Image (spheres, rainbow, N blue to C red):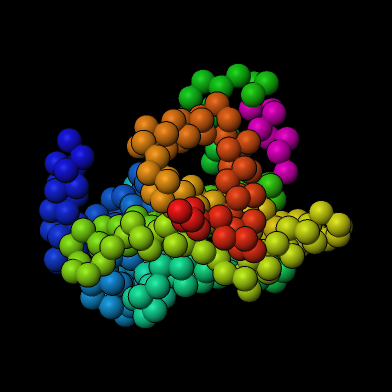
Amino acid sequence: MGASIIKAMRSFVGWASSRPYRLVLLTIVFVHILAPLSAGLLVVDALRRGPRAAMLSAIAAILGVSALGLIVGANLVDTLSLTAPILLGGAASGAVLSWSRSLSLAFQGTIIGGIVVSFVLFGAFPEVSQLGQMLQDEALSLLEAGGASPAQLDQFASVDPIELVRVLLILSLASLVAALMLGYWWYALIGEGVRFGPDFRALKLGRVAGIVLMTLIVADLFLDAELIQNVAPMAVIGFLFQGLSVLHARAHNDKWPRAVIVLIYFTFVPWTYVALMGLSAIGLVDNFFDLRARPRT
């Protein structure tokens, strides 16, 4: 079963990335359904045809999304604010991976880049709360159409719009990192000499990026600064993915049964917050102590 899925996925990626127009069309379709799939295709494009080609594909996809939005009467600003960052970010992450051929370096660049962009967004554009208000209005319309009760609508309407912007940025960064991993895995299926498994199990922020992110989290705990409060939660994403890498490395080194990993992922459903914070803590500690080392015999 697993071999069949991988074979089908290899055929799909090879077919989709063999023609630029196919990749752009699929990117336009997927960005409205599962954004990481679109960004992942752009990562593959950067690895297969180069960073410049991937950026041109991202721009073409943005133009396509805009055209579709105008045809169906959607708000163009709303559409671009939700799709353009994912598409451009996917192409940028793929570019770093294509230049460096290092998954860890591309991972570090994606995390730090996302945090820097967020600092600029919150610091230079005080009206960013308007984006949150837009998201809130759109969500309220969807909830009302879905039959939500007046009490539920009032409860959601009472949420601070800036909080919605924070959530959007956290989800966007998580999507970009997931897309980087997905795109690299896809490319490993069709590229020679590329092995996703070992590179993912070695994924690491490194001392410098790790200290920067940890400092940001500590500053959020002790400083009453709105700018830091808005951006600091994004730092957890970096430690979370490193924690996942440690988990898979230990499973590989200690030869855990595959069922153990599956069970751990299933705990994310009832214990999402606890599981995410636990993995993030593991990722943080791994920057200072090697938690993946093979046991000595």
Q: Give percent across and percent down for residue 62.
A: 36, 64
Position of residue 241 relative to residue 18, above or below, is above
Residue 208 in view here: yes
In the image, 11 versus 26, the foreground residue is: 11
In the image, 58 versus 208, the foreground residue is: 208
Dominant SS in magenta = helix
In the image, 217 versus 206, the foreground residue is: 206
Residue at figure coordinates x 28%, y 63% from the top left: 195
Q: Is residue 237 left or right of residue 85?
A: right
Q: Quadrant of residue 217?
A: bottom right
Q: Is residue 291 left or right of residue 161?
A: left
Q: Give percent across and percent down for residue 241.
A: 51, 54
Q: Give percent across and percent down for residue 158.
A: 73, 35
Position of residue 138 relative to residue 213, above or below, is above
Q: Assess whether residue 192 is covered by the magenta stretch.
A: no
Q: Residue furthest front?
A: 297
Q: Quadrant of residue 257?
A: top left
Residue at figure coordinates x 37%, y 32% from the top left: 259
Residue 172 in view here: no
Position of residue 73 relative to residue 257, above or below, is below
Residue at figure coordinates x 71%, y 38% from the top left: 159
Q: Quadrant of residue 116?
A: bottom right
Residue at figure coordinates x 68%, y 68% from the top left: 211
Q: Is residue 297 left or right of residue 240?
A: left
Q: Is residue 32 left or right of residue 159?
A: left
Q: Quarter of the image containing the N terminus?
A: top left
The stretch of residues the image draws in magenta is 153-160
Q: Give percent across and percent down for residue 12.
A: 16, 52
